[in-house]
Image (cartoon, rainbow, N blue to C red):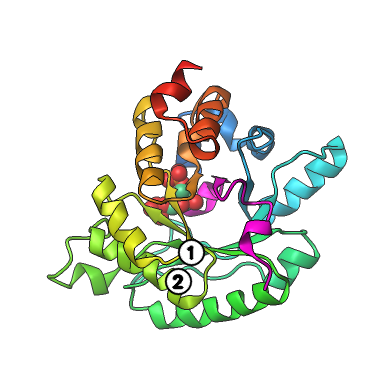
Amino acid sequence: MKDVEDSRIIRNGNSLILAYDHGTEHGPVDFEPMPKSADPTHVFEVGRHDAVTAIALQKGNAEYYRQWEQEKGIEDGAPLLVKINGNSNLAKREDYYSPKQCSVKYAVEELDAEAIGYTMYAGSIHEDKMWEDFREVQEQARRYDIPVVMWSYPRGKGIQENPDYSGQKDPEVVAYGARLGLELGADMVKCKYPGTPKDWNRLEEVAGDMKTVMSGGSKRSDKAFLKDVHATIAEGANGLAVGRNIFQREDPSNLLDSLEKVIFEAETPEEALKD
Ligand code: FBP
C-alpha cells in the first residue's frame, strides 16, 4: 500500500479538501446565500487556489469537472476526490443510510480520481450494511493505491436511544467515529468539531496515526472559523474539509489565503489575518 503522505491530497502532512457535495446532501438551499455557487464551474474555479489539496465531488459533478478541465485546457485544477456515496434530504427513511452511486473502479479508471470519500453513519440501524459497503470500497481503493477518506458521522437511533450519549456531537461519540475509521481501514477521517480543543484532543487520543480533518460546518466569520481550524490543528488535526464556509462567501480567496497559512505554514489565525 502506498504511503498516504505521497498522495497529492496531502501537503506537508496536511490537507484542505473543498467539499462540494451539498447539492446531494442538503439540496440547493445551501446555494441560496451565494447563488453563483449553484454553478459547479464557479466552485471548480475556487478549487484552483493553491491552498486546496482536493475537491470532493459526487459522480455527476466529477464527470462535469473532468469535462470542464478538458474544454478549458485547465491543468491546475484541484486533485479529484470522488465521493462514492451520498443521500438526499428528500427521502423519508427509517434511519440514516448513504447508498453508493459510483464504484471505485469507475472513479479511478474513468474519472482519474486520486482519492475516494465515503460517508459512514455508525449508530444507524443500517450500520452493519454500511460496514459491508465500506469494506468493498476500502479494498478496491487499496488495489488502486489511493487513499480513502471517511466522512465519519455517527448518528441515528443507536445514539439517540443510548442514554450514555448526548447526541452526534458528544465528544465520546465523535471520538468513537474517528476510531472506527482507524479500525475499518480509512486513511483519513473527517469529523464534526465537538466544540472545544479538549474534545478534539479526545478524538486524537484514539485515532492513532490516521489523518484527521475537521468538518467545516455552517458559515461563520473568518476569525471564528480560523480559530476552530487552528485549535483542532494544535490538538493534532491534519487540516480541514470544508464546503459552506468557502462557497457561501462572495470571494473566498482571502479566507483561503489565511487557511493556507494556518494549515500548511503553522501560523496563528492572528498572524494569518494580518499578512
Ligand atoms: P460543510 O463544510 O459545509 O459543513 O461541508 C462538510 C460536509 O461534510 C459536506 O461534505 C456534506 O455535504 C455535509 O457536510 C454533510 O453535513 P450533514 O450531514 O451534517 O448535514
Q: Quadrant of the N terminus?
A: bottom right
Q: Which residue is mark 2?
A: 182
Classify 196 as above or below 4: above
Q: Would you identify the image quadrant in which residue 29 lies?
A: top left
Find out whether residue 6 is within the magenta segment.
yes
Q: Which residues are magenta?
A: 1-27
Q: Are marks 2 and 1 in contact (CB under 8 Å)?
A: yes
Q: Nearer the viewer, residue 73 or 144?
A: 144
Disc number at residue 210? 1
Q: Could you say where residue 95 lies in the image, as x and y percent from the top left?
A: 34, 71
* Residue 155 visible in the snapshot: no
Q: x%, y% of residue 173?
A: 27, 65
Look at the numbered disc 2 and say if its residue's Cβ is closer than 8 Å to ligand 1: no
Residue 50, percent from left and from top: 66, 34
Crowd rating for badge 2 (residues with CA inside 10 Å; few <14, some 14–19, many 20+): many
Seen in the picture, residue 250 relative to 99 is either above or below; the reply is above
What residue type is disc 1 on? Met
Going from N to C along the chain, the mark reached first, 2 or 1, is: 2
Give the class, few, some or many, for how many residues have Cα within 10 Å of label 1's Cα (few <14, many ≥20): some
